[in-house]
Amino acid sequence: MIELRPYNELGGAHHGWLDTRHHFSFADYYNPQRMNWGHLRVWNDDTIAPHSGFPPHPHRDMEIITYVRSGAITHEDNLGNRGRTEAGDVQVMSAGTGIAHSEMNEEDVATQIFQIWIMPNEQGLPPTWGTKPFPKGERSGSFVTLASGLPGDKAALPIRANARLVAATLKTGQSTEYQITAGRKVYLVPASGQIEINGIIASAGDGVAIHNESLLKVSAKQDSEIVLVDVA
Protein backbone atom coordinates (compact mmCIF):
# COMPACT_ATOMS: atom_id res chain seq x y z
CA MET A 1 0.00 0.00 0.00
CA ILE A 2 1.29 3.43 -0.98
CA GLU A 3 -0.52 6.54 0.25
CA LEU A 4 0.39 9.94 -1.17
CA ARG A 5 0.06 12.85 1.26
CA PRO A 6 0.32 16.07 -0.80
CA TYR A 7 2.33 18.94 0.63
CA ASN A 8 -0.58 21.40 0.34
CA GLU A 9 -2.76 19.12 2.49
CA LEU A 10 -0.31 18.87 5.41
CA GLY A 11 -0.84 20.64 8.71
CA GLY A 12 1.35 23.61 9.57
CA ALA A 13 1.69 27.24 10.51
CA HIS A 14 3.38 30.52 9.63
CA HIS A 15 5.20 32.23 12.49
CA GLY A 16 7.01 34.96 10.57
CA TRP A 17 10.48 33.58 11.27
CA LEU A 18 9.26 29.99 10.69
CA ASP A 19 7.19 28.43 7.91
CA THR A 20 6.41 24.86 8.96
CA ARG A 21 4.47 21.87 7.60
CA HIS A 22 3.62 18.84 9.75
CA HIS A 23 3.28 15.36 8.25
CA PHE A 24 1.96 14.12 11.62
CA SER A 25 0.00 15.68 14.48
CA PHE A 26 2.23 18.29 16.14
CA ALA A 27 1.76 21.50 18.15
CA ASP A 28 -1.62 23.01 17.15
CA TYR A 29 -2.14 20.55 14.28
CA TYR A 30 -4.12 17.48 15.33
CA ASN A 31 -5.23 14.73 12.98
CA PRO A 32 -6.17 11.44 14.70
CA GLN A 33 -5.44 9.60 11.43
CA ARG A 34 -1.88 10.95 11.37
CA MET A 35 -0.43 10.46 14.83
CA ASN A 36 2.58 8.40 13.75
CA TRP A 37 3.79 5.87 11.18
CA GLY A 38 5.06 2.92 13.16
CA HIS A 39 7.74 4.33 15.48
CA LEU A 40 8.04 7.50 13.35
CA ARG A 41 6.31 10.20 15.40
CA VAL A 42 7.21 13.56 13.79
CA TRP A 43 8.27 14.76 10.35
CA ASN A 44 8.28 18.54 10.14
CA ASP A 45 9.28 20.49 7.04
CA ASP A 46 10.70 23.76 8.41
CA THR A 47 11.90 26.90 6.64
CA ILE A 48 13.73 29.14 9.12
CA ALA A 49 14.39 32.80 8.35
CA PRO A 50 17.98 34.12 8.50
CA HIS A 51 19.33 34.92 11.97
CA SER A 52 16.44 33.28 13.79
CA GLY A 53 15.50 29.85 15.07
CA PHE A 54 14.40 27.77 18.04
CA PRO A 55 15.67 29.16 21.37
CA PRO A 56 16.69 26.75 24.17
CA HIS A 57 13.99 24.20 24.93
CA PRO A 58 13.94 20.69 26.47
CA HIS A 59 13.33 17.19 25.10
CA ARG A 60 13.39 13.73 26.62
CA ASP A 61 13.10 10.10 25.47
CA MET A 62 13.04 10.76 21.73
CA GLU A 63 15.49 10.23 18.84
CA ILE A 64 15.58 13.52 16.91
CA ILE A 65 17.18 13.67 13.46
CA THR A 66 17.70 16.95 11.62
CA TYR A 67 18.25 16.65 7.87
CA VAL A 68 19.40 19.96 6.38
CA ARG A 69 17.97 20.60 2.91
CA SER A 70 19.49 24.04 2.29
CA GLY A 71 21.49 26.54 4.31
CA ALA A 72 22.79 25.35 7.69
CA ILE A 73 21.61 24.87 11.26
CA THR A 74 23.67 25.56 14.40
CA HIS A 75 23.00 23.39 17.45
CA GLU A 76 23.95 24.21 21.04
CA ASP A 77 22.94 22.27 24.15
CA ASN A 78 23.36 22.13 27.92
CA LEU A 79 25.88 19.28 27.61
CA GLY A 80 28.37 21.69 26.03
CA ASN A 81 27.90 20.48 22.45
CA ARG A 82 27.91 23.00 19.62
CA GLY A 83 27.99 22.30 15.92
CA ARG A 84 26.93 23.54 12.49
CA THR A 85 25.27 21.12 10.07
CA GLU A 86 25.15 22.04 6.37
CA ALA A 87 22.84 21.11 3.51
CA GLY A 88 22.73 17.39 2.77
CA ASP A 89 24.16 16.40 6.17
CA VAL A 90 22.46 15.20 9.33
CA GLN A 91 22.63 15.60 13.08
CA VAL A 92 21.20 13.23 15.66
CA MET A 93 20.14 14.00 19.22
CA SER A 94 19.19 11.18 21.57
CA ALA A 95 17.23 13.09 24.21
CA GLY A 96 17.28 10.28 26.77
CA THR A 97 16.74 11.43 30.35
CA GLY A 98 16.60 15.04 29.18
CA ILE A 99 18.48 17.64 27.17
CA ALA A 100 17.93 21.34 26.46
CA HIS A 101 19.09 22.70 23.12
CA SER A 102 18.73 25.54 20.64
CA GLU A 103 18.58 25.22 16.85
CA MET A 104 19.48 28.49 15.15
CA ASN A 105 19.88 29.64 11.57
CA GLU A 106 22.93 31.88 11.87
CA GLU A 107 23.20 32.21 8.08
CA ASP A 108 22.31 35.16 5.83
CA VAL A 109 19.84 33.02 3.88
CA ALA A 110 16.83 30.90 4.86
CA THR A 111 17.53 27.37 6.04
CA GLN A 112 15.30 24.42 5.17
CA ILE A 113 15.30 21.31 7.33
CA PHE A 114 13.41 18.10 7.92
CA GLN A 115 12.96 17.56 11.66
CA ILE A 116 12.31 13.85 12.24
CA TRP A 117 11.43 12.28 15.60
CA ILE A 118 11.55 8.51 16.15
CA MET A 119 10.46 6.70 19.31
CA PRO A 120 13.44 5.09 21.08
CA ASN A 121 13.88 1.41 21.86
CA GLU A 122 14.57 2.20 25.50
CA GLN A 123 13.83 5.16 27.76
CA GLY A 124 15.93 6.68 30.51
CA LEU A 125 19.34 6.54 28.83
CA PRO A 126 21.93 9.37 28.98
CA PRO A 127 21.41 12.07 26.32
CA THR A 128 23.84 12.32 23.39
CA TRP A 129 24.34 14.45 20.28
CA GLY A 130 26.32 14.00 17.08
CA THR A 131 26.63 15.31 13.54
CA LYS A 132 28.31 13.94 10.46
CA PRO A 133 29.07 15.27 6.98
CA PHE A 134 28.39 12.78 4.21
CA PRO A 135 30.15 13.29 0.88
CA LYS A 136 27.37 14.15 -1.55
CA GLY A 137 28.74 11.90 -4.29
CA GLU A 138 28.21 8.83 -2.13
CA ARG A 139 24.41 9.11 -2.40
CA SER A 140 24.33 9.98 -6.10
CA GLY A 141 22.11 7.49 -7.89
CA SER A 142 21.35 5.26 -4.91
CA PHE A 143 20.22 5.29 -1.29
CA VAL A 144 22.88 5.75 1.39
CA THR A 145 22.23 5.14 5.10
CA LEU A 146 22.87 8.30 7.15
CA ALA A 147 21.47 7.40 10.59
CA SER A 148 20.50 4.01 11.93
CA GLY A 149 19.85 1.81 14.93
CA LEU A 150 19.84 -1.37 12.84
CA PRO A 151 22.59 -4.01 12.82
CA GLY A 152 25.12 -3.68 10.04
CA ASP A 153 24.79 0.09 9.50
CA LYS A 154 28.11 0.82 11.18
CA ALA A 155 29.06 3.83 9.02
CA ALA A 156 25.87 5.71 9.90
CA LEU A 157 25.24 8.03 12.82
CA PRO A 158 23.83 5.82 15.60
CA ILE A 159 20.30 6.20 16.90
CA ARG A 160 18.61 4.25 19.70
CA ALA A 161 15.66 3.15 17.61
CA ASN A 162 14.59 0.28 15.40
CA ALA A 163 14.86 2.55 12.39
CA ARG A 164 17.05 3.75 9.56
CA LEU A 165 17.24 7.07 7.67
CA VAL A 166 18.55 6.99 4.11
CA ALA A 167 18.88 9.59 1.37
CA ALA A 168 19.54 9.64 -2.36
CA THR A 169 20.05 12.16 -5.13
CA LEU A 170 18.84 11.19 -8.59
CA LYS A 171 19.34 12.97 -11.88
CA THR A 172 16.41 13.15 -14.30
CA GLY A 173 15.85 9.68 -15.69
CA GLN A 174 17.90 7.89 -13.03
CA SER A 175 16.34 5.06 -11.03
CA THR A 176 17.15 3.18 -7.84
CA GLU A 177 15.52 0.61 -5.55
CA TYR A 178 14.96 0.11 -1.85
CA GLN A 179 14.21 -3.29 -0.32
CA ILE A 180 11.71 -3.38 2.57
CA THR A 181 11.86 -6.15 5.15
CA ALA A 182 8.51 -7.84 5.82
CA GLY A 183 6.47 -6.13 8.52
CA ARG A 184 8.26 -2.79 8.33
CA LYS A 185 6.95 0.60 7.24
CA VAL A 186 8.57 3.31 5.15
CA TYR A 187 7.90 7.05 5.00
CA LEU A 188 9.48 8.93 2.11
CA VAL A 189 9.60 12.62 1.20
CA PRO A 190 11.26 14.19 -1.85
CA ALA A 191 13.27 17.14 -0.57
CA SER A 192 13.37 18.47 -4.12
CA GLY A 193 12.28 17.52 -7.62
CA GLN A 194 9.67 14.98 -8.64
CA ILE A 195 9.83 11.18 -8.48
CA GLU A 196 7.78 8.11 -9.30
CA ILE A 197 7.53 5.35 -6.65
CA ASN A 198 5.95 2.09 -7.82
CA GLY A 199 3.77 4.08 -10.22
CA ILE A 200 2.88 6.92 -7.78
CA ILE A 201 4.10 10.46 -8.60
CA ALA A 202 5.39 12.55 -5.67
CA SER A 203 6.71 16.10 -5.82
CA ALA A 204 8.93 18.06 -3.45
CA GLY A 205 7.44 18.13 0.06
CA ASP A 206 4.85 15.41 -0.52
CA GLY A 207 4.75 12.58 2.01
CA VAL A 208 4.56 8.96 0.87
CA ALA A 209 3.43 6.42 3.49
CA ILE A 210 4.27 2.84 2.53
CA HIS A 211 3.54 -0.56 4.04
CA ASN A 212 2.92 -4.10 2.78
CA GLU A 213 5.41 -3.49 -0.03
CA SER A 214 8.62 -5.48 -0.45
CA LEU A 215 10.44 -3.39 -3.06
CA LEU A 216 10.39 0.30 -3.92
CA LYS A 217 11.32 1.25 -7.46
CA VAL A 218 12.10 4.97 -7.52
CA SER A 219 12.74 6.96 -10.69
CA ALA A 220 13.37 10.69 -11.08
CA LYS A 221 11.10 12.77 -13.29
CA GLN A 222 13.31 15.76 -12.41
CA ASP A 223 16.62 16.12 -10.59
CA SER A 224 15.57 15.01 -7.10
CA GLU A 225 16.76 14.59 -3.53
CA ILE A 226 14.92 11.92 -1.53
CA VAL A 227 14.80 11.22 2.21
CA LEU A 228 13.39 7.92 3.50
CA VAL A 229 12.79 6.52 6.99
CA ASP A 230 12.41 2.75 7.51
CA VAL A 231 10.75 1.85 10.85
CA ALA A 232 9.14 -1.01 12.72
Image (spheres, grey):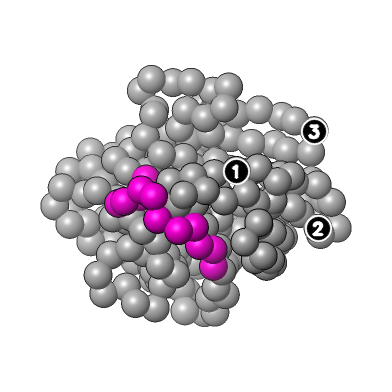
* Residue 132: quadrant of the picture: bottom right
Tell me which label, 1 or 3, sits earlier in the chain. Answer: 3
Query: Which secondary structure lies at badge 1?
Result: strand
The foreground one among 155 and 10 is 155
> Amino acid under label 1?
Pro
Q: Are marks 3 and 2 in contact (CB under 8 Å)?
A: no
Identify the residue position indicated by label 1 in the image.
58
The foreground one among 155 and 109 is 155
Mark 1 surroundings within 10 Å by alpha-carbon count, few (fewer than 14), some (14 through 19), many (20 or more): few
* Residue 74: quadrant of the picture: bottom right
Asked whether residue 140 is in view, the answer is: yes
* Magenta run includes residue 119: yes
> Amino acid under label 3?
Gly
Q: Is residue 29 above or below residue 135?
A: above
* Magenta run includes residue 78: no
| Residue 118 location (% of width, % of height) | 40, 47
Mark 3 surroundings within 10 Å by alpha-carbon count, few (fewer than 14), some (14 through 19), many (20 or more): few
Range of magenta residues: 118-130
x 52%, y 48%: residue = 98
x 60%, y 43%: residue = 58
Identify the residue position indicated by label 2 in the image.
106
